[in-house]
Image (cartoon, grey):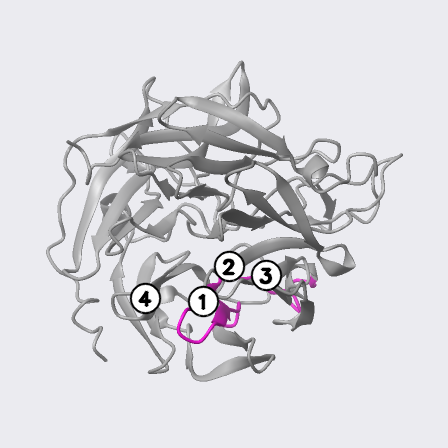
């Protein structure tokens, strides 16, 4: 296990006693709702992102920000880009995935943003508003970086959205998990072949709590050596899809059921259970690095050695000192490998204190929302040296705090970008924010 040393918890790295001040951008979308994953820094130096919508008649919107010019451009309405503007169906409200660059194009997928509250849970709408049809299903799309054109590649079967996706950018293969039932999808960009494999576990988030409900994996990863894609399940199993053999199978002898991660009833909503929250391929040791959501522990998975090792807790220092789980019960998706291919950047929460007392929210949360007021921090972790640093809290210039942050892009311009909630004209909306990258500050 060569990675034992790299996972060792080296000097803790105190906070720099400074706060990070985030600038807020106005994308011009008054209905913008929370965004998950859907922001990426592309090779052209620009930041591509989607702002979501939770309305049945309003689609999410696809934007690009040019740091050099300081200009935000609307690329398109997701429903329009999917060719459904005249269908009067429930809108393409979200993209829930990062953008993947392949042969001069960005590849991504769409998701539903409007839900029906059934038995206290957000479900795929079964009774659409009058005059509207049911959601038609998510689309796989590509955006040409040179021409600005968008191409529709495939429609996800059975009217399901895409809750997670990864792309093998060597072979042109796309892997997805659908919502709400959790089917595994394979799509070959070069041939146009789409394969709808079986459900990963239970009935996904369409299931009945206490029976076949299972939280679905929000992050997939590809081993570039083999082209195999990996996903986790609520029970803590790891599944592999091998395109060469067209086989989807459970990886034997390794799992995520670790005492450090906590104990979960994986049949109940409110957390990601034993799922990993976010993972990426680390070329340095040819392994998968990830974070478990609720506990915030770093781990490394070796597909060849068939082992998984738990590392240090990657949460903020205030969270470590409190000894509590993440404020956001699902954990945070703002977790990525930086441009140096050695440093992890993690936007994570922490407790908020008033008069020395920790503010506490509700214990049981059906939707994975924040347990109380959020205290966003930037944490970095240098993998080769094991050096952890909490760079301190992120604030707006007026003293407000960014919240519901579940995405990250480390720009080539020395800034870190994400999507957060802000108050604008008396209304809470989501929009693009950025702050200086303390590791690149000149």
Tell me where residue 437 sits by quadrant. top left
Query: Quick one: label 2 or label 1, which is nearer the N terminus?
Result: 2
Residue located 65% across and 36% down the image: 54
> What number is the disc on residue 222?
1
Residue at mark 2: 166
- As drawn, which residue projects farthest toward the front? 147
The local crowd at label 2, few if under 14, some if 14 to 19, many if 20 or more residues have their Cα within 10 Å, is many
| Magenta stretch, residue numbers | 207-236
Residue at mark 3: 176
Q: Position of residue 89 (x, y in %)?
A: 81, 40
The local crowd at label 1, few if under 14, some if 14 to 19, many if 20 or more residues have their Cα within 10 Å, is many
> Distance of mark 4 from mark 1, alpha carbons?
16 Å
- Is 394 within the magenta? no
> Distance of mark 2 from mark 1, alpha carbons?
7 Å
Query: Quick one: label 1 or label 3, which is nearer the N terminus?
Result: 3
Overall secondary structure of the magenta stretch?
Answer: loop
Front-lying residue, 125 or 361: 125
Residue located 39% across and 22% down the image: 69
């Amino acid at each position: 296990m060569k990675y034992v040393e790299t996972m060792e918890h080296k000097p803790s790295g105190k906070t720099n006693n400074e706060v990070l001040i985030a600038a807020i951008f106005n994308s011009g979308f008054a209905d913008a709702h929370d965004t998950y994953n859907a922001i990426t820094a592309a090779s052209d130096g620009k930041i591509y992102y989607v702002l979501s919508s939770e309305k049945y008649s309003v689609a999410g919107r696809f934007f690009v920000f040019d740091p050099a010019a300081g200009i935000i451009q609307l690329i398109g309405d997701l429903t329009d880009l999917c060719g459904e503007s005249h269908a009067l169906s429930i809108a393409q409200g979200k993209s829930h995935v990062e953008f993947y660059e392949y042969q001069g194009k960005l590849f991504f997928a769409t998701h539903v943003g409007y839900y029906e509250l059934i038995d206290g849970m957000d479900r795929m709408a079964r009774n659409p508003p009058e005059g509207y049809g049911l959601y038609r299903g998510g689309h796989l799309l590509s955006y040409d970086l040179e021409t600005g054109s968008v191409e529709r590649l495939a429609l996800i079967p059975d009217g399901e959205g895409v809750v997670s996706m990864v792309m093998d950018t060597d072979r042109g293969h796309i892997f997805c998990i659908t919502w709400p039932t959790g089917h595994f999808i394979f799509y070959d960009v070069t041939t146009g072949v789409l394969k709808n494999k079986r459900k990963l576990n239970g009935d996904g988030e369409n299931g009945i709590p206490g029976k076949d409900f299972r939280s679905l994996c929000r992050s997939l990863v590809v081993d570039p050596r083999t082209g195999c894609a990996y996903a986790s399940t609520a029970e803590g199993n790891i599944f592999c899809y091998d395109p060469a053999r067209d086989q989807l199978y459970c990886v034997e002898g390794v799992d995520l059921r670790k005492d450090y991660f906590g104990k979960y009833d994986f049949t109940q909503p409110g957390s990601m259970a034993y799922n990993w929250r976010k993972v990426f391929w680390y070329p340095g040791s040819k392994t998968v690095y990830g974070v478990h959501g609720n506990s915030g522990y770093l781990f490394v998975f070796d597909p060849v050695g068939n082992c998984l090792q738990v590392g240090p807790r990657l949460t903020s220092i205030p969270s470590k000192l409190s000894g509590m789980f993440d404020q956001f019960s699902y954990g945070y998706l703002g977790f990525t490998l930086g441009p140096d291919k050695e440093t992890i950047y993690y936007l994570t929460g922490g407790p908020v204190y008033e008069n020395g007392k920790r503010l506490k929210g509700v214990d049981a949360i059906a939707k994975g929302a924040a347990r109380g007021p959020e205290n966003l921090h930037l944490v970095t972790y240098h993998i080769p040296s094991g050096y952890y640093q909490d760079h301190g809290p992120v604030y707006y210039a007026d003293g407000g705090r960014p919240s519901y942050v579940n995405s990250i892009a480390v720009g080539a311009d020395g800034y870190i970008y994400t999507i957060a909630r802000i108050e604008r004209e008396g209304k809470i909306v989501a929009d693009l924010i950025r702050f200086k990258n303390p590791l690149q500050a000149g």
